[in-house]
Amino acid sequence: MTPHMNTRRAAALAAVAAMVVVGVQTGAANATPGASDHGSSASPRSASPAFNSASARTTAIKSAQTEAPSAAGSLGLGSQEKLIVRDVIKDAGGTVHTRYERTYAGLPVLGGDLVTHTASSGKLKGVTKATKARISVPSTTAKIKTAANARKVIWARGTTPVLAFETVRTGVQKDGTPSRLHIITDATTGKKLHSYEAVETAGIGNSQYSGKVDLSTTAAGSGFELTDGDRGGHKTYDLGQGESGTGTLVTDDDDTWGDGTGNDRQTAAVDAHYGAAKTWDFYKSALGRDGIAGDGKAAYSRVHYGDAYVNAFWDDSCFCMTYGDGADNKSALTGLDVAGHEMSHGLTAATANLDYAGESGGLNEATSDILGTSVEFFADNATDVGDYLIGEKIDINGDGTPLRYMDKPSKDGGSADYWSSGVGDQDVHYSSGVANHFFYLLAEGSGAKTINGVDYDSPTSDGSTVTGIGRDKAVQIWYKALSEYMTSTTDYAAARVATEKAATDLYGADSAELKAVDAAWTGVNVK
């Protein structure tokens, strides 16, 4: 490709980006007017969409889709490739980040997602791609037979794109969690290429530890129901120990819900409803995001799933969170950080859509731990104070220890403190330790520290000292990287690059925040 053609394509794509934001209103930036873009004292530019309404965001997405054919041509995609817009973010600096899925000859390209980054001037700043490979296959005719419900796709998460089948097997996982296992098979050879579990679990739990809380409910008839009209109409249902369907909307006569124990069925619903509300508020306040998908629409919660089910999970197919009652059917797994964790699986699905396997799966899980922990701090609940411990209230190990630790993940007996070449082969709840440890180091720094009465002592892989920049800045960097620079195939090396870009955007190329990002990644052996 000649430089002349590159220039023409960049110019054309810039024109597309300019058209996308025509008529889209923007909200006020979080940056202080006149603040420096450099140094640790800099006020961050907003990491969140600058659209001031869900309708403005919808308008931007529709505009981007209209211009998608031009964008595909400007990017040099083949004649059989098309782009489908998933999201558009215009940050406070004016940069437009447009996230696309890709098709080839009408077939979905798994691992073909990409994000374009266009400056307010119209100049294309860069493109983040899930794969650098050119999408092309010799034929779209399969040579093997497969299940009737299989979907023909292009598998682009390897080194060379291939025609493949995606089959979904439903069932139950070992711990009773529903299973929706996606299996990718080469359509020419029949070889299994990849598999991942679409029902994303926390692997953690909580009982009723948030104390007396305010709930947003709705009057209905002569009573009330757990419908949150302030947050997209979020509803909380009782599954009655069932394992399918929506269940029954939780209602009450006098708007006083539960008794704080597992003996009252409403108590689990109170905690789930409260956790969903605090997570929504955190997204809105800290991230400027209007709900999980940024469109102002709520998910819903289901409590009392199964019999003695010791887990909770997010399922993107129902856009809902589901909670079991614990081994005794009286200790519902509806804690504050659990709700934040589960809803944040939905946030990840709506943004980078990190594949739930390998290193990207660890990053997916860590994102839920990071944001769930951030929700817990944000809520400022006196009964369940913020900490960097995951599942600290349920005593699932029987000895008073939490399920996971962010300051030194290996203390749980299985999670990875540092990156190694085999970390992607671990269960995603253990490989997540690398990113959890990175986030703790970035927020709080290395060494001994006491926060809200909890003692931490975070090491580094090379014995280096890391100085933290504070949790608020750390979560802004992580969210911006997730929503604007990560893709479905992002691994730890690419996550470092994504957070470096985010820190540069927010605080400047010479900032202490960017240096801290580099130091924290080096501290967990991601170099």
Image: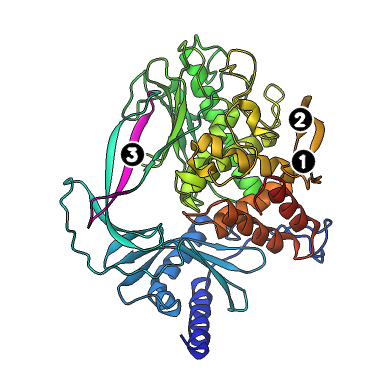
Q: CA distance from mark 1 to mark 3?
A: 37 Å
Lower position in the chain sequence, tag 2 or tag 1: 1
**Labels 2 & 1 near each other (Cβ < 8 A):** yes
**Labels 1 & 3 near each other (Cβ < 8 A):** no
* Residue with the most extreme bottom position: 4
Residue 327 spot, x, y in % from top left? 46, 13
Residue 174 spot, x, y in % from top left? 38, 25
Front-lying residue, 462 or 172:
462
Residue 247 spot, x, y in % from top left? 35, 26
Front-lying residue, 334 or 460:
460
Residue 181 is marked as 3
Q: CA distance from mark 2 to mark 1?
A: 10 Å
Lower position in the chain sequence, tag 1 or tag 3: 3
Segment colored magenta: 176-192
The three-letter amino acid code for the residue at tag 2 is: Tyr
Residue 523 vs 122, above or below: the answer is above
Left or right side of 162 for 97: right
Residue beneath disc 2: 456
Residue 311 spot, x, y in % from top left? 47, 24
Residue 40 is marked as none
Label 2 secondary element = strand
Residue 444 is marked as 1
Residue appearing at x 57%, y 25% in the figure: 335
